[in-house]
Image (tube, rainbow, N blue to C red):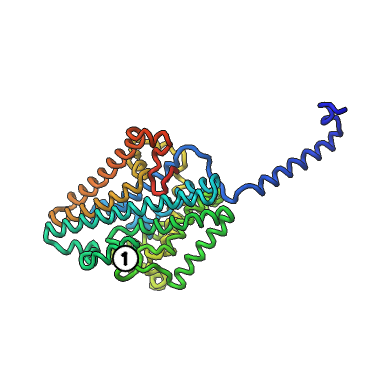
Amino acid sequence: MSSIADPIAGSPVADAKTGAKAEAEVKAKAVAAAPAISLPATGERELRLDLFRGLALWLIFIDHLPTNLLTWLTIRNYGFSDATEIFIFISGYTAAFVYGRAMLEGGFVIATARILRRVWQIYVAHVFLFTIFLAEISYVATSFENPLYTEEMGIMDFLKQPDVTIVQALLLRFRPVNMDVLPLYIVLMLFLPLILWLMKWKPDVTLGLSVLLYALTWQFDLYLSAYPNGFWAFNPFAWQLLFVFGAWCALGGARRMSRILSSNITMWICIVYLVAAFFVTLTWYVPQLGHIMPKVIEQWMYPINKTDLDVLRFAHFLALAALTVRFLPRDWPGLKSPWLRPLILCGQHSLEIFCLGVFLAFAGHFVLAEVSGGAALHALISVCGILIMCGMAWIISWYKHSADKGASKKGAGGNADLAGGGA
């Protein structure tokens, strides 16, 4: 007859071996069952993402205005990359964070359904923005009898053939000026289920395939055509690399790179590259410095293509991101500062604020074109636009957290970013 004392009555050495063997088997099973991707524990939002996404929205708005004093504060004047790289990278990061968790918990079908629903929401927002933007430009051009607005904003073809152009707009092939980012994001999100499925299998291989597609794009000149002629301002075949890289970082890649990012060698390589990019950019605005640049380097470097995400632009963004992660930790107290709250709110409601920024950019362009004013008026319009964006972000946040009690109960508060979920 056995008793509860029997399991501990055997040889200590034999028991130790048996226990070690069992523990090893458990660990092996756990490793085999663990998914290839990993996600941070659910908790507070990653405010650094919201901060820089909001900053990107402000910079995009300023860059869409005629050149003014604030324009010289945007990063495009001091290096190869600009706010677009920040925006697409963070979009890929947050999308993978939100829907990667859905895929791990609910499976491929559930995650795909959620992604497609969000794609539809962004598509409807794009069509709505297109309609309002078109009406805004047409009204201004007609009221002030200035057809140059329609030509400058790229809607002349719509006025000539509205029936054909509307169909092309619905197919994302016709877009007025400043409306290129959302179509790019829609296409990238359509392929997010495949990206996440591949990353669940082999994240590093998925990133490698993304790099391969990027290289093939440059080698064979892959692109999407636009209406009535030309091609997309942001080539999805190239810009997918930044989006996939953001997703890869969100699903464990950033953690695996932590030793590289914390290395002093990496830090100095990034600093040297950023300084070199600054001096190259300086020659664009100070022609007298052009002789400093060796002709061999000029022939190798130019043109620095934004449409196909030039390698130099991508490397410039990587250098900025590496230094940011190093010197701005997740628990930085400044993220709780009320001075940064407007930026963070804008980043948390990026879809609405981006659409508003496109509308405000043309309004500001119109005012500056019709009213003669100096640098002060330019700066005032830029500041007023940013204040309006901040005010709208605050109203949306207040509504979701206070007025919309149903959404709050469902936990939807603060999840109005482009990915459709918290980060």
Measured along the vertical axis of the image, is residue 229 above or below residue 346? Answer: below
Which residue occupies 36% across, 33% down?
405
Measured along the vertical axis of the image, is residue 236 above or below residue 419? Answer: below
Q: In this view, does 194 lie to the left or right of 284?
A: right
Residue 72 appears in the figure:
no
Question: Farthest residue in the front direction?
Answer: 163
The image quarter containing residue 397 is top left
Where the C terminus falls, by quadrant? top left
Q: In this view, does 186 lie to the left or right of 58?
A: right
Q: Where is residue 39 in the image (x, y as percent from the top left)?
A: 54, 45
Q: Which residue is under mark 1?
A: 289
Measured along the vertical axis of the image, is residue 30 above or below residue 229? Answer: above
Which residue occupies 32% across, 50% down?
354
Q: In this view, does 2 lie to the left or right of 97?
A: right
Q: Where is residue 271 in the image (x, y as percent from the top left)?
A: 44, 54
Query: What is the three-letter code of the residue carrying label 1?
Result: Leu
Q: Neighbour class for label 1 at 10 Å: few (<14), some, many (≥20)?
A: few
Where the N terminus falls, by quadrant? top right
Residue 414 appears in the figure:
yes
Question: Farthest residue in the right direction?
Answer: 1
